[in-house]
Image (cartoon, grey):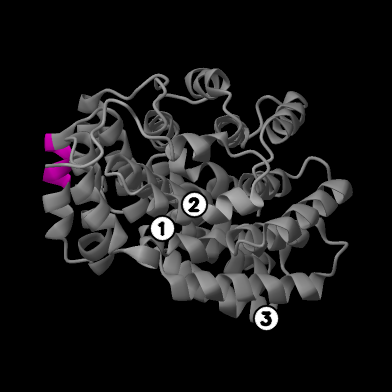
Amino acid sequence: MARALLSLVAGDRWDEATLKKQLVIAHRDALAVGEREASLVYGVFLHTHRQYRLTADHLVGHFARWPADELAGHMLGAFSACGDSVYRARGEELTEQQAAVAGPDSWPWTNWLAAARAEQGRAREAYELAEHALQLFPRSGVAVHALAHAAHELGTGAACAGFLDQWLRTDPQAEQSRHLNWHAALQSLACGDFPDARRRADTALAGTDVGMRAATNWRLLLVGQSPAGRSAPERIRALLAAPGGTAEIFHTFNLALALAVEAATDDLHALARRTAADERPDYREVLAPVVRALAEITAGRPRAAVDLLTGLGQETERIGGVRVEREIIQDTLARALVDTGEHARAAQLLHHRHATRRHHTYEDLLLTPRPNIPAQES
């Protein structure tokens, strides 16, 4: 099981031959131990090969035989990775059921329930569950991550960034280090500490963290701030052209954000045409208009972006990712509305944030007209 779990955590950094070799050995050894272990390794095989629907289906059967299996819980992300709202809801329901079986003293299942509640928008409940899990096991990476998601919904600002820094100081090499620094950058954005957001993007994120860099920089640009270090357009083009470059919708969306940061309008139009011709409905019906909207904004045509994004509504959930990540689409629409003089619509769009978040300097700036942008397009 140690070999299988290492494959689950580190497999995306291995080449295909190494991953296959490790999992073949793990499965052989698991078969000699028992059916549960063999089932777990098979689930890891599916997950590491990005067969998320098959992983999710397999987990349903696995939990039916071995309820509240903590090792299997590490693969629950497969349900949301499917990019299917039905699977996402099924995963949340399964998490609730297994957490009830495990009971409140199980810190792993309390972790995963906290993460599910955060994704459901039940931020205060998620925060309390994450705090409880951290009381049971202070070094839980899943719990601190769930707390960061809940803190984003609550807009706790510098308090959350400080907590994340304190947690990371105990183990600066923690697997979650870069991602938690990204969450801290979002909290710095929330309360208007833009230098700290840029510092984290520049010092804590690696060059390979294209998605987190782009998500930070696009948010900075939307509120009129200078971005942190960027990704070269040539690198983004190479990632899109690589085998599997557009295999996952959320990854493709992040690359589109990176192009938007670079104001690569022509590249965005090309990507929009490519996704519009894709046989996969989520790419054709949702991703394509989002990418087109980004292209229109970089070209100085916010009215066209408003029309494209307004029509999508809740369909943007099909982009994948989680609430914190998809929220940037709403940010983009709010900015486009303000830039076309529709301040009231933009304010209504962000009303729920002002009602629930402690710090919302970022939202205030999203709703602030920029003097160099005309109120209406001709």
Q: What residue type is labelled 3?
A: Arg
Q: Which amino acid does label 1 sit on?
A: Gly
- Earlier-in-chain disc, 2 versus 1: 1
Regarding residue 35, the answer to whether it shows in the image is: yes
Residue located beneath label 1 in the image = 320
Q: What element carries label 2?
A: loop
- With 356 as the anchor, is 376 left or right in this view? left
Name the kind of residue labelled 2 in the image. Answer: Leu
56, 196: nearer the viewer: 196
Judged left or right of residue 263, residue 321 is right
- Choose top left, top right, bottom left or bottom right for residue 178: top right
Q: Closer to us: mark 3 or mark 1? A: 1
- For numbered disc 3, what is the local secondary structure? helix
Q: In this view, does 155 lie above or below 50?
A: above
The residue that label 2 is drawn on is: 350
Would you call the spot at circle 1 few (<14 residues within 10 Å), some (14-19), or many (20 or more)?
Answer: many
Depth check, front residue: 354 or 139: 354
Q: Which of marks 3 and 1 is nearer the N terminus?
A: 3
Assign a secondary structure to mark 1. Answer: loop
Residue 211 pos. (x, y %): 40, 37
Quarter location, residue 94: bottom right
User: For residue 24: magenta?
Assistant: no
How far apart, in angstroms, are the residues tagged by discs 2 and 1? 21 Å
